[in-house]
Image (cartoon, helix red, strand yellow):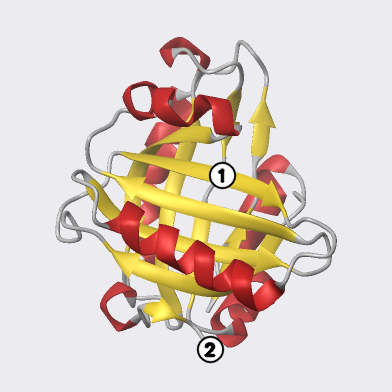
């Protein structure tokens, strides 16, 4: 399981309706993409109180084969490169995934938290503790699903939560102190969501 995201920061006066129309017309194209657990089409919009305008899709892949096919095999990423330039693609190795009570509903907001792994931390203990937190968060009302992943190059944890009680401005408050970033969800592809392993991913 692999998580992936790229964030395209747009001008302050950018018409975010362009992104919304783009997602509405092109989003369903990945509804059957092999190897894709889910893709959440995320935006940050200054008109809704965000400090920036941004388009920032988040992906959860079953394995690297689907991710590679998307990036290198004409799976849609070339359209992003053509229209916006080539963004930096961040990716993390999956540690765990848990469905929430609203798994069957359509998520309206997402929260991404990142946290540095302390030098000298016992990695096995860290994983067990974070997976316990993952289960607790997944059980909260309004939760679609929660994913935990790690970048072992930067030693960075990422926690990604899809929620159904948004918009983003409504769900960001409780996580603001943790340095979280809230997004509105415009569309969710979920071709392999039900086949994603839950709990510990190793």
Q: Vertically, is 95 above or below 136?
A: below
Q: Is residue 102 rendered to the left or right of residue 192?
A: left
Numbered tag placed on residue 113 in the rendering: 1
In the rendering, at what x and y percent does residue 45 appear? Answer: 49, 21
Question: Which quadrant of the figure has residue 98?
Answer: bottom left
Q: Secondary structure at mark 1?
A: strand
Question: Which quadrant of the figure has residue 169?
Answer: top left
Q: Vertically, is 59 above or below 196?
A: above
Residue at the image position 46 percent from the left and 82 percent from the top = 35
Residue 17 appears in the figure: yes
Residue at the image position 26 percent from the left and 49 percent from the top = 143
Q: Is residue 141 rendered to the left or right of residue 181?
A: left
Q: Secondary structure at mark 2?
A: loop
Q: 97 or 34, which is in the foreground?
A: 97
Q: Earlier in the sequence, mark 2 or mark 1?
A: 1
Q: Is residue 147 rendered to the left or right of residue 163?
A: right
Q: Vertically, is 99 above or below 166?
A: below
Q: CA distance from mark 2 to mark 1?
A: 22 Å
Q: Is residue 155 rendered to the left or right of residue 24?
A: right
Q: Vertically, is 182 above or below 113?
A: above
Residue 73 appears in the figure: no
In the rendering, at what x and y percent does residue 118 appear? Answer: 78, 55
> Is disc 2 surrounded by few (<14), some (14 to 19) or many (20+) residues within 10 Å?
few
Numbered tag placed on residue 104 in the rendering: none
In the rendering, at what x and y percent does residue 20 appear? Answer: 40, 33
The residue labelled by disc 2 is: 202
């Amino acid at each position: 399981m692999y998580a992936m995201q790229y964030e395209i920061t747009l001008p302050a006066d950018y018409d975010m309706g362009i992104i919304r129309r783009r997602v509405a017309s092109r989003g369903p194209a990945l509804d059957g993409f092999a190897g894709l657990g889910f893709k959440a089409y995320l935006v940050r919009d200054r008109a809704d109180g965000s400090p920036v305008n941004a388009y920032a899709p988040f992906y959860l892949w079953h394995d690297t084969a689907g991710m590679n096919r998307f990036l290198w095999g004409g799976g849609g990423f070339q359209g992003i490169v053509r229209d916006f330039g080539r963004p930096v693609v961040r990716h993390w190795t999956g540690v765990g995934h848990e469905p929430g009570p609203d798994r069957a509903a359509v998520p309206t907001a997402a929260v991404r938290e990142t946290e540095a792994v302390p030098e000298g931390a016992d990695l096995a203990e860290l994983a067990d503790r974070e997976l316990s937190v993952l289960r607790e968060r997944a059980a909260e009302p309004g939760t679609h699903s929660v994913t935990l992943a790690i970048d072992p190059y930067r030693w960075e944890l990422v926690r990604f939560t899809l929620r159904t009680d948004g918009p983003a401005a409504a769900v960001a408050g409780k996580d603001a102190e943790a340095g979280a970033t809230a997004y509105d969800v415009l569309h969710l592809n979920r071709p392999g969501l039900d086949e994603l392993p839950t709990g510990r991913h190793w």
